[in-house]
Every structure is written in C-alpha cells, then in structure tokens.
C-alpha cells in the first residue's frame, strides 16, 4: 500500500504582504511605487518627475522632495483603499536620509507598515 505525500499548504506569504513599497533614487529624481505582489502590477506610484508636482518642489532630488513624494503616495494609497504595505529595501538602501523621509511620510499619512 502506497501512502501519498501530504498536501502542501498554500503559500500564505503572498496573502500576508500583498502590497510592497519600493523606492528608487537617481541623481535627479525620487520615485516610489507600491506593487501588488500576487499580480505583479503597480497599485500606486508617485515621482518627482510628474509635471504636476514639479512647480511645488524646490528640488526634485533632496530629502524634502522625498518627504513630499512619501506624503503624496500615502494619500493616493488611502484613496485606493490600501491600508497597509510592506517595505522592500535594496541591499544598499539603509533606513536614513531619503529612504527614512519617504517611509515616515507614508506612515504619517495613515498607512500602516508591515
């Protein structure tokens, strides 16, 4: 008599943290986007390249611009009904400077961080 192997439980990681915040910084611009992991689509994004945001910013690449992008992204997430996001940092990104500004402003906007 052959005993079948137990059935594998479904991967719940995709459902625990479905929305992931990713940030990208260049020498000229700051951008952040929230990606829906199971479908690999962009749920919301904000960038200092947007023409509507450029006039209200003094610089498009400093910590103040990163804070403004975080605030706008947090507001857009709440409008879409996304209450919580997980954070994905690249290996070279540390929690300071621009990264800290984006994350803190998203948190202050009312989005929970996982």
Image (tube, rainbow, N blue to C red):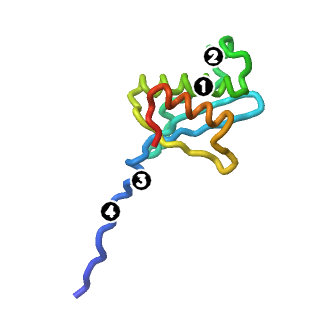
Q: CA separation, marks 3 and 4?
A: 11 Å
Q: Quadrant of residue 25?
A: top right
Q: Is residue 97 left or right of residue 22?
A: right
- Can you tell which mark lies on residue 53? 2
Q: Which quadrant: the C terminus?
A: top left
Label 3 sits on residue: 13
Q: Give residue 26's position: percent from left, percent from top.
A: 73, 34
Q: Are marks 3 and 4 in contact (CB under 8 Å)?
A: no
Q: Residue at x 48, y 23 (%)?
A: 75
Label 1 sits on residue: 69
Label 4 sits on residue: 9
Q: Are marks 2 and 4 in contact (CB under 8 Å)?
A: no
| Mark 2, secondary structure of its residue | loop
Q: Is residue 8 left or right of residue 112?
A: left
Q: Residue at x 77, y 32 (%)?
A: 27
Q: Give residue 89's position: percent from left, percent from top.
A: 60, 45
**Crowd band around label 2 with a 10 angstrom C-alpha radius: few (<14), some (14–19), many (20+):** some
Q: Are marks 1 and 2 in contact (CB under 8 Å)?
A: yes
- Which residue is at the front of the view, 21 or 4? 21
């Amino acid at each position: 008599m052959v005993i079948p192997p137990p059935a594998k439980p479904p991967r719940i990681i995709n459902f625990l943290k479905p929305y992931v915040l990713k940030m990208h910084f260049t020498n000229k611009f700051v951008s952040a986007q929230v990606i829906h992991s199971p479908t690999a689509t962009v749920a919301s994004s904000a960038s200092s390249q947007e023409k509507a945001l450029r006039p209200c910013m003094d610089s498009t690449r400093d910590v103040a611009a990163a804070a403004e992008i975080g605030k706008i992204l947090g507001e857009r997430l709440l409008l879409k009904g996304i209450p919580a996001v997980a954070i994905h940092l690249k290996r070279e990104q540390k929690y300071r400077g621009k990264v800290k500004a984006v994350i803190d402003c998203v948190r202050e906007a009312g989005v929970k961080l996982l």
